[in-house]
Image (tube, rainbow, N blue to C red):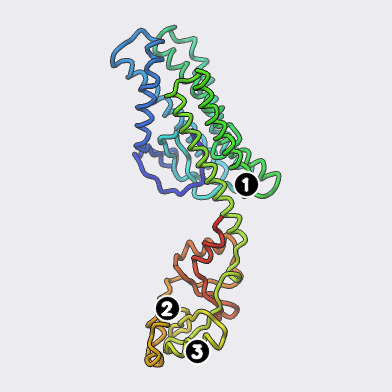
């Protein structure tokens, strides 16, 4: 199974090469599916070819390699289409479930997303067609004819399954793109396509059970369908959760979440800082450096722990947490720009500046996380 996915670029596995600038990785989990495929395909080899012994498993393993190559072509098609539409892929990964093409960012437009998605199943359909056309050239009952027929059949199944309209399948990306174009709302389109993927997952599980009950499939064959159904359900659910997270993130505004704060000089004492906060009705205190820039945020619990007799002597900076570089936000910052700013400068707390670079508040990362959580 394969799907084009906006995912982080960091990948692990055996590096096989590149498709243009895009690295290709083979994860060790592929060898597990290769072993299973070798065992499952062996009875077909025995029935088709007059052969026994290790040669049967060698031919079966060759078929597993052909499937790997088919998946690679599928993912390479995604990568080439993505580069052509202005959203370069970051990696091609071949693994236990087939593979995926990773991106740092989603497609810039709905039709670009559709174009990137549709070439995957189309490439498998073309492989199936080419293999089917070559079947008559191979001798009946021979290994070549068996592998050609199996290649045509498997690629046709992969193309058809991936074309189903539900995330994370390529057909789901197409559905997402069409709804996005019609509605103008990419995130709502992702939610709908994710729920469609859940329907397909349930259908896959139901079909797996029904096929065993009717004798259409052996339990071992149906087991893989069950695993695929479970994977689809989890991936579709993740697509829905991510879309909902982004919907919430688009509506987040720093002004709605920060705690009112006052600024004190680097020489202020704990008592003076707490008095300033109480007088302004603030709940947080930001310590400025000698240049008047936010440098630390007073830890309320540490400040409360200072004995009253020493509060007039201990500097506020002694009970404050230093602000990392860049942990300063402006009022009015909202949506994805705010989320990006938090990601670019990770910190547990941020100083918030209003007009004239005056300290007006403190933003706690946990408050943002709670707001955007589904």
The residue beneath circle 3 is 275
Q: Residue at (53%, 50%) from the top-left corner?
A: 105
The label nearer to you, 3 versus 1, is 3
Label 1, secondary structure: give it.
loop
Label 3, secondary structure: give it.
helix
Q: CA distance from mark 3 to mark 1?
A: 54 Å
Q: Is residue 193 left or right of residue 327?
A: right
Residue 136 bears which disc, if any?
none
Label 2, secondary structure: give it.
helix
Of callouts 2 and 1, the N-terminal one: 1
Q: CA distance from mark 2 to mark 1?
A: 49 Å
Where residue 95 appears, x then y in whole percent?
Answer: 41, 36
Where 312 falls versus 148 (above or below)? below
**Do the CB atoms of the residues marked 3 and 2 lie less than 8 Å apart?**
no
Where residue 244 appears, x then y in whole percent?
Answer: 59, 52
Q: Residue at (57%, 37%) from the top-left corner?
A: 117
Where is residue 28, by image quadrant?
Answer: top left
Where 223 falls versus 142 (above or below)? below
Q: Residues within 10 Å of mark 1 (few under 14, many from 20)?
A: some
The residue beneath circle 1 is 109
Residue situated furthest front in the rendering: 213
The residue beneath circle 2 is 301
Of callouts 3 and 1, the N-terminal one: 1
């Amino acid at each position: 199974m394969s799907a084009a996915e906006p995912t982080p670029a960091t990948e692990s596995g055996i590096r096989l090469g590149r498709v243009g600038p895009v690295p290709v990785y083979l994860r060790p989990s592929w060898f597990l599916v290769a072993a299973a495929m070798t065992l499952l395909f062996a009875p077909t080899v025995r029935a088709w070819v007059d052969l026994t012994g290790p040669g049967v498993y060698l031919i079966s393993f060759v078929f597993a390699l052909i499937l790997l190559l088919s998946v690679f072509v599928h993912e390479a098609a995604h990568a080439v289409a993505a580069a052509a539409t202005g959203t370069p892929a970051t990696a091609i990964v071949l693994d236990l479930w087939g593979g995926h093409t990773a991106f740092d960012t989603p497609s810039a437009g709905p039709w670009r997303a559709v174009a990137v998605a549709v070439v995957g199943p189309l490439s498998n359909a073309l492989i199936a067609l080419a293999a089917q056309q070559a079947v008559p050239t191979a001798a009946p009952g021979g290994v070549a004819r068996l592998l050609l027929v199996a290649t045509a059949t498997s690629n046709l199944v992969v193309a058809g399954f991936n074309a189903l309209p539900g995330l994370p399948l390529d057909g789901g990306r197409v559905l997402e793109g069409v709804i996005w174009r019609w509605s103008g709302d990419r995130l709502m389109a992702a939610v709908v396509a994710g729920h469609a993927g859940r329907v397909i997952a349930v259908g896959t599980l139901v079909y797996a059970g029904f096929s065993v009950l009717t004798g259409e499939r052996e339990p071992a064959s149906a087991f893989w369908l069950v695993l695929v159904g479970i994977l689809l359900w989890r991936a579709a659910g993740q697509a829905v959760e991510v879309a909902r997270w982004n919907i919430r993130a688009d509506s987040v505004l720093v002004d709605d979440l920060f705690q009112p704060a006052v600024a004190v000089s680097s020489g202020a004492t704990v008592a003076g800082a707490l008095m300033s906060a109480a007088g302004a009705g603030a709940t947080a205190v930001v310590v400025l450096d000698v240049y008047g820039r936010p440098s630390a945020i007073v830890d309320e619990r540490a400040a409360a722990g200072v004995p009253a007799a020493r509060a007039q002597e201990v500097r506020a900076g002694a009970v404050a947490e230093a602000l990392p570089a860049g942990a300063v936000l402006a009022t009015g910052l909202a949506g994805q720009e705010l989320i990006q700013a938090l990601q670019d400068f990770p910190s547990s707390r941020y100083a918030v500046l209003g007009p004239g670079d005056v300290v007006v508040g403190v933003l706690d990362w946990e408050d943002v996380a709670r707001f955007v959580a589904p």
